[in-house]
């Protein structure tokens, strides 16, 4: 397939990845950002019975056609209590938020709408809302409000807990091998000579893999030789995916492709019409997807957001879609060049409390200080005309 655009590259990667079929049982509180591996049926009805949504007094409703209305208190039902009452004319029962309701309840009179003296209340004014949560209003036993595959956030975890699950079957986390490449690189923190630099991108990619639900395997740093690169890549082939950093371009010492060619590697594409990140490589060795990230740190991290994140989730059977929003830009944007540009930017508020997107001045692909200020990417199409201040632009929020 000839790949030019970012969207074509993203789709080619998704189409090439074989999702895992392996699952495991995980405790509910450890399921954040995991992908549900099996649709589950609720073990209970929620609410299990009609309940009160507020603190107040349960009434039949026919007793309060005119105000003030005086009713006798039969007792009270606390949340979790098994006390049972049947309402009759002229009577009420004190209830609380979450309380099961007495038989015959038609409405909850809010406690602030009445006054109490001894065992009687006087209702001072009418209210239209009933403040009753009906049995099964949220879901019934054997309903399936959580379908697989589903990316589990705190919201879904709370739902599964209400369905009375203590653990869930989720897809296993993929193991992603990460290899940096370059004679000039040392591990961060090592003593450096003038011609050396820290391999700063590698820990960032490893951190992103963890964030997106993968298990990173650090293959270290390969020297600029086919022997060194090939030996480390060979170790990576026992995992679910390999990510290389650097060495995927066309220089004399960019040897990742040559090394992969000796490992049954089939190239799907190399180079895309994107800035930053043109020298992006993707292919397969057998069924193992291999993503070759550019060597420039900003290019590598931007490409990880666009291509690696969706790959890790796809390996877990989840199809990820970017949440692209539109915001007004706080300044003019110049005419764009021939490549699709993902401009580093940050969201801020103006004096009227409106959200604006502000592009960072330094868009150099090696500037990590400018990347550290960015929480978003502005998407600009190839050869886009100058964009005026306060115009709407498409934005990907990185957080």
Image (spheres, rainbow, N blue to C red):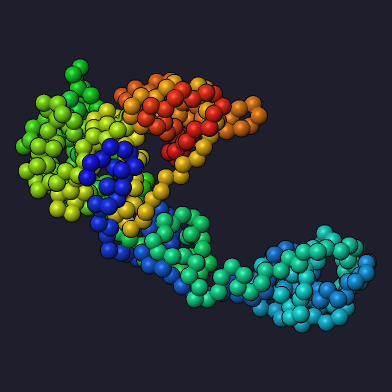
Closer-to-camera residue (79/331): 331
For residue 311, above or below residue 110: above
Residue at the top extreme of this rendering:
194
- Give the position of the N terminus as an image quadrant: top left
Closer-to-camera residue (73/391): 391
Q: Residue at x 9, y 42 (%)?
A: 261
For residue 137, above or below residue 383: below
Q: Residue at x 38, y 67 (%)?
A: 38
The answer to whether residue 202 shows anywhere in this view is no
Closer-to-camera residue (319/104): 319
Q: Position of residue 345 (x, y in %)?
A: 45, 29
Q: Is residue 374 left or right of residue 311?
A: right
Image-quadrant location for residue 349 = top right
- Give the position of the C terminus as an image quadrant: top left
The answer to whether residue 154 shows anywhere in this view is yes
Q: Position of residue 387 (x, y in %)?
A: 49, 25
For residue 107, above or below residue 380: below
Q: Residue at x 42, y 22 (%)?
A: 335
Q: Is residue 321 left or right of residue 20?
A: right
Q: Residue at x 46, y 22 (%)?
A: 386
Q: Position of residue 5 (x, y in %)?
A: 31, 38
Count of marks placed on residues:
0
Q: Position of residue 48 (x, y in %)?
A: 60, 75
Q: Is residue 30 left or right of residue 138?
A: left
């Amino acid at each position: 397939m000839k790949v030019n655009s970012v969207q074509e590259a993203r789709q080619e990667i998704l189409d090439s990845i074989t999702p895992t079929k392996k699952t495991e049982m995980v405790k509910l509180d450890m399921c954040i950002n995991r992908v549900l591996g099996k649709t589950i049926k609720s073990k209970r009805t929620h609410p299990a019975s009609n309940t009160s949504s507020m603190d107040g007094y349960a009434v039949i409703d026919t007793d309060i056609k005119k105000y003030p209305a005086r009713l006798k208190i039969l007792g009270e039902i606390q949340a979790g209590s098994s006390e049972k009452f049947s309402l009759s004319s002229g009577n009420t029962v004190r209830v609380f938020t979450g309380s099961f309701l007495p038989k015959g309840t038609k409405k909850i009179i809010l406690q602030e709408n009445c006054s109490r003296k001894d065992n009687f209340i006087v209702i001072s004014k009418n209210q239209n809302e009933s403040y009753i949560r009906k049995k099964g209003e949220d879901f019934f036993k054997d309903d399936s409000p959580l379908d697989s595959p589903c990316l589990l956030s705190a919201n879904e975890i709370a739902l599964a807990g209400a369905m009375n699950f203590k653990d869930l079957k989720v897809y296993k986390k993929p193991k992603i091998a990460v290899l940096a490449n370059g004679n000039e690189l040392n591990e961060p923190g090592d003593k450096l000579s003038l011609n050396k630099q820290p391999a700063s991108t590698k820990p960032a990619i490893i951190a992103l893999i963890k964030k997106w639900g993968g298990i990173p395997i650090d293959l270290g740093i390969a020297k600029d030789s086919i022997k060194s690169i090939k030996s480390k890549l060979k170790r990576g082939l026992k995992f679910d995916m390999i990510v290389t950093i650097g060495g995927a371009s066309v220089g004399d010492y960019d040897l990742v492709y040559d090394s992969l060619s000796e490992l049954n590697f089939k190239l799907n594409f190399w180079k895309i019409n994107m800035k930053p990140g043109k020298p992006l490589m993707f292919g397969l060795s057998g069924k193992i997807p291999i993503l070759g990230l550019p060597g420039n740190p900003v290019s590598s991290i931007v490409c990880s957001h666009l291509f690696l994140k969706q790959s890790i989730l796809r390996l877990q059977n989840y199809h990820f879609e970017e949440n692209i929003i539109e915001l007004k830009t706080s300044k003019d944007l110049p005419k764009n060049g021939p490549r699709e540009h993902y401009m580093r930017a940050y969201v801020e508020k103006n004096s009227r409390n409106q959200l604006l997107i502000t592009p960072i001045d330094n868009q150099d692909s090696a500037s990590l200080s400018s990347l550290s200020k960015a929480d978003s990417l502005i998407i600009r199409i190839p050869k886009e005309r100058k964009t005026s201040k306060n115009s709407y632009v498409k934005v990907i929020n990185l957080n």
